[in-house]
Image (cartoon, rainbow, N blue to C red):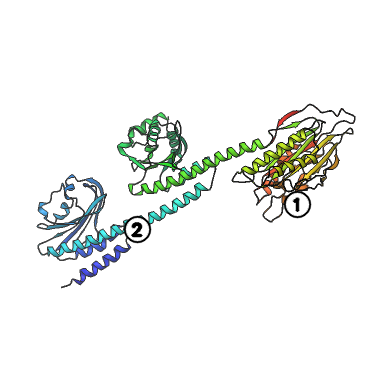
Amino acid sequence: MVDDTWSSALHRLWQAASRAEEVSALADDVYAPLLATPGVHLVVGTRWEDPQILRYMRALRAGSDSPVITETSRSVPKAAVREPGDEPVVTRIPVAGLDDAGWPEAELLRRTPGATFVVCTFRLDHRGWASLGVGVDASADVAAVEGRLAQAVDVIVACHTGIIQRGREARRGADDALLAEASLQMDSSLDVEETLRRVARIAVPAVADGALVHLLRSEGPEFVSATHVAVRQQRALEEIGRENPWLAALLARRSEDEDTVFLSGPELDGSPFADTGEAADASHASHGDGDGARPVAAEADRHSTVISISTLRARGRVIGSITFVYQRPEVRLPSSAFLRSLATRAALSIDNALLYELRRHAVLSLQEHLLPSQLPVTDQWDLSASYEVGDPMLDVGGDFYDAVPRPDGSIALLIGDVCGRGAEAAALTGLARHTLRTLLEQGTDPGTALSRLNRALRQERASRFLTAVVATLAPQADGTALLTTCSAGHPSPLVLRSDGTVSEVLTGGLLLGVLDDVSYESHEERIGPDDTVVLFTDGLTESREAGGAFFESILPVRLAALRGFDAAHIAESLTQQAKAYRASGQDDIALLVARWTGVPPGADLLPHPLQLVKAAR
């Protein structure tokens, strides 16, 4: 005969199990139907951690609506023999035969003399086990009671397994989201210091309570960054990362290990993470009245400290390590697989930042060799230059400039722009600048110098073209200077007059390196004292705002506003204004500015003594 009452209760129990977020939520749906079974006067359940640590006991007696609940951490040594294997075990025991040293339920069961305890012990997970039992009298059908206990335990185990699985899936989703966010955060910067700070911050507090990042150097681990959820512990963690010999020795030993390792308990003895009152007191005393940093473990008021160390490996080599500090329950510790994945992403981000830094230094070094390190200066002219790299990938640009003293006392200014970027453009830049400089130093006029450079490019079969402009400033007896300008497809120079007006030097000419036997015509005009000549590349004029307008449209007005300033201020100001104006475009900006200071009428026009000043970069 089917027991409809129990069947209905079991159906409700399965439904409750499918919705439960923790096993304790099933208590009412388990205890009440069992207590309604004929002959059952008490239902009691226990939860154990390891073999003998009682964590929880819940009992409900017939005729009572309020269960007795005990939460504890009591050690019951003799209960270890009750620990089940992988399969549930149902046992019948006379209450009179129960030993209190192994059966904490005994005291409750003795209130009904002559009763029998029918108990099912079962394993929930690797951390412990549980039991569900009933006290029955002589009227009970013990076999039926055992069957109901086994069915109830099946539901409890299935519910717990489902909760764990759903928790793992939720945690896996959260881990995946965190890893994706970590990659975005760490990859969004190519600055080494910022990347290292982000690596330390990204997992705190979501993954750990603290983090330390070290890079592996030839002399050993080098501390670079640390963070902690507690502001006071931030300083302590930084001190540990920089100075603690225990951690330094540990990281050195593990520098080649690929697996993540967790350390806790006795493994941390002698370390700043050890959970010992003596270590905390000693550290506290050594820092005076408590204003200084305390050891990390001293703050672990409720949970033992655990640390994990993951190796940072990129491109087949170890670049460092990341150490996480945990002061949280074991169930909230991340998995080794998650930490390995996080370490891999962190290592790639750090490695990319380090490679970018090396490339940046190499490019800047090469760029310095393509530009003059010094500009000539006399009391007749004020020279300055500015160079702004526009390409975020830091390929070597093709912009160049120079100022060349000539045998007749004049000075030649030159500026140019090679098409494209990279090594080939850099090689052509060096050829163009040094060819023009050599010719102009020998007194060659600007047009001839450009023609000979064009011929050299054609002979070398250069695959790129370039633009350039050469201007000479020759002192005149009346105190002015003769400005002779020759252009090869380059933006026209501007002249800022002493009265604030701005004019364009009208020049024209074919690009260099396109056709054979090209000649270039020169344009001449006079400039007076405090007039300023501005030469620039198209990175200045083609800086474009969000609305589409070019900086070229406002350049004369911006230049006029700089009347009365020296060459250095004009060069730097125009560069920064164009950079701030630019919403799009990544071209380099080069400027060469010459302010004519003039000479008294009838003064000696022979070459003046020269001195060199460092060129602005």
As drawn, which residue projects farthest toward the top? Answer: 609
Disc 2 vs disc 1: which is toward the camera? Answer: 1
Q: Mark 2 = which residue?
A: 166
Q: Residues within 10 Å of mark 2 (few under 14, many from 20)?
A: few
Residue located 33% across and 59% down the image: 21
Establish if 604 lies above or below 318: above
| Whether label 2 touches label 1, CB < 8 Å | no
* Relative depth, front residue between 171 and 273: 171
Residue 191 picture location, percent across and down: 54, 42
Residue type at mark 2?
Answer: Arg
Name the side, left or right, on which 275 lies relative to 410. Answer: left
Can the viewer see residue 493 in this picture? Answer: no
Residue reaching furthest to the bottom: 1
Q: Secondary structure at mark 2?
A: helix
Residue 551 picture location, percent across and down: 72, 50
Q: Quadrant of residue 228?
A: top left
Question: Where is 475 relative to 106, above or below?
Answer: above
Horizontally, is 100 left or right of 533 in the view?
left
Viewer-side residue, 198 vs 104: 198
Task: Mark yes or no: residue 281 visible.
Answer: yes
- In the picture provided, is 53 more to the left or to the right than 515? left
Q: CA distance from mark 2 to mark 1?
A: 63 Å
Type of amino acid under label 1: Ser
